[in-house]
Structures are given as structure tokens and as C-alpha cells.
Image: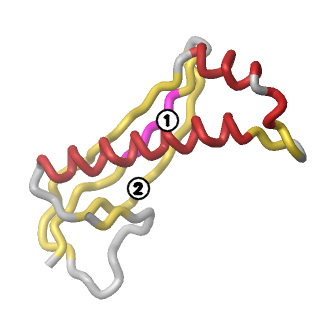
Amino acid sequence: MIVTTTPSVEGRKITDYKGVVVGEAILGANVFRDIFASITDIVGGRSGAYEKSLGEARDTALTELQQRAAAKGANAVVGVDLDYEVINNMLMVSASGTAVVLE
């Protein structure tokens, strides 16, 4: 499945719009505790543990997005946007876009 932040896919025509799809992943408060417990990972202002957790959450959100698009009969998602929000000491990563059918 093609997943892109652009509104179209170069060289491919959109033949049908299946609607907005969203995927979410939430990191609980214990993730932050674990991250700060492994403070030794911080090198040059970056935390490997934190980046790994964010990467996993982003991948989960994008996988969920693709699954929901496929369930609607789409073969691509265009206009994808990734958002990061803190809610009650938890981090939510959400991915949204438009499920489409490409020729």
C-alpha cells in the first residue's frame, strides 16, 4: 500500500475516494519513567530509548492507518499527517489521511 503525505501519487490517477482513515498509538506514563531511568542513553542531547519508543508508536499508528484503509477497499492513503499529543501524562501518536483507490 502506498502511504504518502502528498495529495496525489505522481503518475497514478485516483479513481475512488474511500474516506478519512486514522491510526493511533498511545504510550503510557510508564514509558516516560523507563526512558528517564535509562538516562545513560542520552548522548549529545538525544535519547535512544525515547526515539525508539516514538518510532514504535509511529509505526503502530501507520500500520493501523493502512489496515483501516485496506478494510475500506483502498490501495493507498494520501495526505497523511502525523500528530503527537500529550494527554494525562501519556503520549498519543496519530496518523490520518484519505484512503483512495489508484488505477
Task: Judge by depth and name the residue closer to the eye, 90 or 8.
Answer: 90
Residue drawn at x 20%, y 62% as measured from the top left: 100
- Magenta residues? 92-96
The question of residue 7 being in magenta is answered with: no
For the residues labelled 1 and 2, the Cα–Cα distance comes to: 13 Å
Using residue 20 as the reference point, say whether residue 72 is left or right of it: left
Residue drawn at x 21%, y 44% as measured from the top left: 68
Using residue 79 as the reference point, say whether residue 57 is left or right of it: right
Q: Most prominent secondary structure in the magenta stretch?
A: strand
Q: Which residue is under mark 2?
A: 80
The type of residue carrying mark 2 is Val
Residue drawn at x 12%, y 49% as measured from the top left: 72
**x, y percentage for residue 76?**
25, 64
**x, y percentage for residue 58?**
48, 43
Task: Judge by depth and name the residue closer to the eye, 12 or 27.
Answer: 27
Q: Which residue is under mark 1?
A: 93
Seen in the picture, residue 52 relative to 38 is either above or below; the reply is below
Using residue 25 as the reference point, say whether residue 36 is left or right of it: right
Say which element carries label 1: strand
The N terminus - image quarter: bottom left
The type of residue carrying mark 1 is Val
